[in-house]
Image (tube, grey):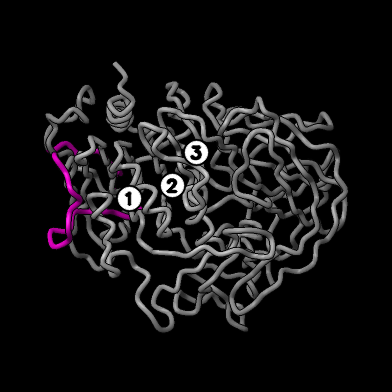
Amino acid sequence: MGMEQIRRWESGALAHAVNDPFGQGPLPWLRGSENYFDDTGHVVPWYVDMEAGRGRPGPGGAHGSGPRTADDVHRQIKGFTSTPSVAPGEAIDFRITVDPPQRFGVDVYRIGHYGGDGASKITNSPRLSGIVQPPPLTADRTVSCHHWWLSWRLQIPSYWRLGAYVAVLTTEDGYRSHIPFTVRDNHPADLLLVLPDVTWQAYNLYPEDGRTGASLYHAWDAEGRLLGERDAAVTISFDRPYAGAGLPLHVGHAYDFIRWAERYGYDLAYADTRDLHAGRVDPTRYRGLVFPGHDEYWSVPMRRAVERARDLGTSLVFLSANTMYWRVELAPSPAGPDRLLTCRKRQGPGRSALWRESSAPEQELIGIQYAGRVPEPHPLVVRNADHWLWEATGAREGDELPGMVAGEADRYFPRTTLPEHTRRILLAHSPYTDSEGVTRHQETSLYQAPSGAMVFAAGTFAWSPALDRPGHVDERIQRATANLLDRMCKRD
């Protein structure tokens, strides 16, 4: 298999580039200084060069052109965690394969503003002995690495801050991969940030090797051709690394929000969608729940927990589009609970797995619902500019915010039931052209439930990147988001 073919598959780029027009390469989470000092004292560039670094590395594992990203064919270094999230005082296990066997290290970073750098190094492992773990197990299209041996156990100190973390794995000969995880707690806070790990896994094509990898969207045939949704997996496992560089496909959307929110001092707690599913967090302990990125796959317990929170007065913020589109089930694997994700979509007998086709359309919770893909970015057109959301933004009625309708879009469906509300308003009504050349519309929605909870839905993939991603920042979106969160948090 040629290296060009491997590069085409990195992190699902071939399969899903249309879904995320905001990519910054393999490391969308850290910026600032272009270099850092590794634990051997050598200067190592942050950004993995996908084209370079094919020869021998320099001293300390750093190649002249920088670290090299691990791939899913050679598995130079790849890994995953035993649990998606962990509380201070608990331990998290890392299962890592290294080929060829050699020593490696793990640097652990917390995502945040940190003076504009985007993350801060919290700790690092000792030098560890890497082994070649057994090949992934496959059954039908389900791929699992639950049988891999434990490589490193990280005890989370009680003083660690809650948040989104990334473990950076680096071999002695200069290959690098990543493992995201969350440190959570159930203490009250103004806002609970819910990271969409269920949707992240739905898109995970690991291993992108042209043979065995599968997601809920794609799989391979015997000739190494990428097959579509009808031939994809029905059940996938969390017991495996993420493809390519080891970060989920849409992870940057969440990190954009985190950097911005921490810069302005919002009181955040953190959880994953599987925490909601399992009842590990009580969402009613927060003034608002924030869903910062593409959050397409929801289980029944997830939806019930969020509906209950709204009905008891907790506000909801959906900063993307195509939210809660597919209904899924979670089941245990040999490694633990909620490690298998099933979504039958339209395969086999039974009802469709679309929420809107199962007598519970997503608009009944969100206020709008998925309308379709946006092939090219279009402006977001401001509507009801005298509303408090647009206060101090400078936005006027009909103003166009360039590039703010992108990726995918939501709108109001007149023939679909609306949620019970005391007030409701549309804050954007934006024409765009779909892939067939037909003019469609994106909308941004806000309603107030009888409990007093506010429910905001951005209706576009471009909202979170507009908060803090270079090349996509829009000060009007920043101000509007602050207006929304400040009102939820009762800030002056």
Query: Can residue 297 be seen at all in this image of the molecule?
Result: no
Q: Please tell me which of labels 2 and 1 falls first in the chain.
A: 2
Q: Nearer the viewer, residue 455 or 1?
A: 455
Q: Please tell me which of labels 3 and 2 falls first in the chain.
A: 2
> Within 10 Å of the Cα at label 2, are there few (<14), some (14-19), or many (20+) other Cα atoms?
many
Image point (32%, 19%), residue name = 491
The residue under label 3 is 255
- Seen in the picture, residue 261 relative to 449 is either above or below; the reply is above
The residue under label 1 is 406
Q: Nearer the viewer, residue 57 or 478?
A: 478
Across and down, in percent, residue 47 comes to: 63, 41
Q: Nearer the viewer, mark 3 or mark 2?
A: 3
* Magenta span: 398-423
* Disc 2 + disc 1, Cβ < 8 Å: yes
The answer for how far apart the CA atoms under marks 1 and 3 are is 18 Å
SS of the residue under disc 1: strand
* Disc 3 + disc 2, Cβ < 8 Å: no
Across and down, in percent, residue 31 comes to: 57, 32
SS of the residue under disc 3: helix
Name the image quarter holding residue 124.
top right
- Seen in the picture, residue 46 relative to 369 is either above or below; the reply is above
Dividing the image into 4 quarters, which one contains the C terminus?
top left
The answer for how far apart the CA atoms under marks 2 and 1 are is 9 Å
Image point (47%, 65%), residue name = 329
The residue under label 2 is 22
